[in-house]
C-alpha cells in the first residue's frame, strides 16, 4: 500500500467518534493530520497525543463549518503553514432524535441547524479549501454521509434530507472540481462509537440483526476507507460508497 507520508489531511469533527478513527487511520499511514474542532479544543489536543508522529506536527484547528469568514481565514493560514492540503474529510455533524411522525417537534431552529451544519457546512469547507486541494495535484474530499439518505430513516427527517443533499453535493462537486480534485462520500449506518454505547441495547441488537455482516461498522472502518481512497482507489470520484456491513440491503 502507498503511504501518506508528506501529505496533509484536515478532518472536520476530527475529535468525534467517527472523526477520531479517521484521524488515527490517516496518521498510521504517515499523514500529518489537522484535527478540526468546534466545540472542544481539548478533545482534539488529547487525540493528537495518541497519534503516530508524522513529518510535520499534527495540529488542532478550529473549523466552524457554518462560518464562511472563519473558514477563509483558516485557508489562508494553512496556505502559509503547513503550506498544503491534500485531503479534506467532512466529518462534522449535529442532530437530535425526533420521531418521524412528530412533525411539530422538528422545529425550524433544529431543521435549520441540521441543514446548515451537514449540507451548507460541507459545501463551505470545500469552497474555502478547494484552491489548496487543487495545488496538491491529487486532492481528495471525502464527505461522511449516512444510509439515512437512502433509507429515509434516521435521527430525524431533516437529518435524512441533509444527508441526501450531501450525496448530491458530492456528485456535483466531483464534476465541478475534476480532474484536479476527487470527491467521494462514505455512507455508514450505525457506527460503534462511544456515543452508540449509550443506546438501548435492543436498538443496537436490531441494527446488528438487520446487518448482513452481523456487526456495526467501527470508526476505523471509516478511516481505512478514507485511506484506501487516498492511496489505492485513485480512479474513484463522484460516488457514494456504503460502509455499513450491508445494512442498506435490508
Image (spheres, grey):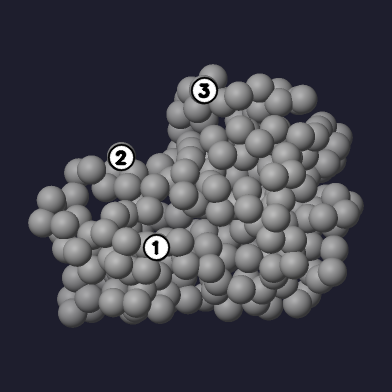
Q: Earlier in the sequence, mark 2 or mark 1?
A: 2
Label 3 or label 2, whichever comes before in sequence order: 3
Which quadrant holds residue 78?
Answer: top right
Residue indicated by mark 2: 194
The residue that disc 1 covers is 244
Q: Are marks 2 and 1 in contact (CB under 8 Å)?
A: no
Give the camera-side residue of 47 and 224.
224
Q: Of tags 1 and 3, which is closer to the observer?
A: 1
* Spatial separation of the CA atoms under disc 1 and disc 3: 26 Å
Where is residue 80 shown, x and y percent of the image? 86, 35
Q: Quadrant of the C terminus?
A: bottom left
Residue positioned 23% across, 68% down in the render: 210
Above or below: residue 82 compared with residue 100: above
Q: Is residue 34 left or right of residue 247?
A: right
- For label 3, the residue is 50
Label 2, label 1: how far apart the Cα atoms are:
17 Å
The N terminus, quarter of image: top right
Amino acid at each position: 500500500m502507498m503511504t501518506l507520508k508528506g501529505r496533509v489531511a484536515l478532518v472536520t469533527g476530527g475529535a468525534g467518534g467517527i472523526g477520531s478513527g479517521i484521524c488515527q487511520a490517516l496518521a498510521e499511514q504517515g499523514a500529518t493530520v489537522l484535527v478540526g474542532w468546534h466545540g472542544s479544543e481539548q478533545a482534539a489536543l488529547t487525540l493528537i497525543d495518541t497519534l503516530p508522529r508524522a513529518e510535520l506536527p499534527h495540529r488542532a484547528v478550529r473549523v466552524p463549518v457554518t462560518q464562511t469568514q472563519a473558514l477563509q481565514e483558516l485557508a489562508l493560514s494553512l496556505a502559509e503553514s503547513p503550506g498544503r492540503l491534500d485531503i479534506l474529510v467532512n466529518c462534522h455533524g449535529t442532530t437530535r432524535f425526533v420521531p418521524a411522525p412528530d412533525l411539530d417537534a422538528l422545529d425550524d431552529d433544529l431543521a435549520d441547524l441540521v441543514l446548515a451544519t451537514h449540507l451548507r457546512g460541507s459545501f463551505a469547507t470545500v469552497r474555502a479549501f478547494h484552491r489548496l486541494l487543487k495545488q496538491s495535484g491529487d486532492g481528495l474530499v471525502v464527505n461522511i454521509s449516512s444510509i439515512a439518505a437512502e433509507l429515509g430513516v434516521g435521527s430525524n427527517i431533516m437529518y435524512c434530507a441533509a444527508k441526501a443533499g450531501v450525496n448530491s453535493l458530492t456528485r456535483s462537486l466531483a464534476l465541478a472540481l475534476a480532474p484536479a480534485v476527487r470527491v467521494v462520500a462514505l455512507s455508514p449506518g450505525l457506527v460503534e462509537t462511544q456515543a452508540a454505547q449509550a443506546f438501548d441495547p435492543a436498538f443496537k441488537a436490531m441494527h446488528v440483526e438487520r446487518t448482513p455482516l452481523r456487526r456495526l461498522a467501527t470508526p476505523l472502518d471509516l478511516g481505512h476507507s478514507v485511506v484506501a481512497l487516498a492511496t489505492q482507489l485513485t480512479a474513484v470520484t463522484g460516488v457514494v460508497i456504503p460502509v455499513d456491513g450491508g445494512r442498506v440491503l435490508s
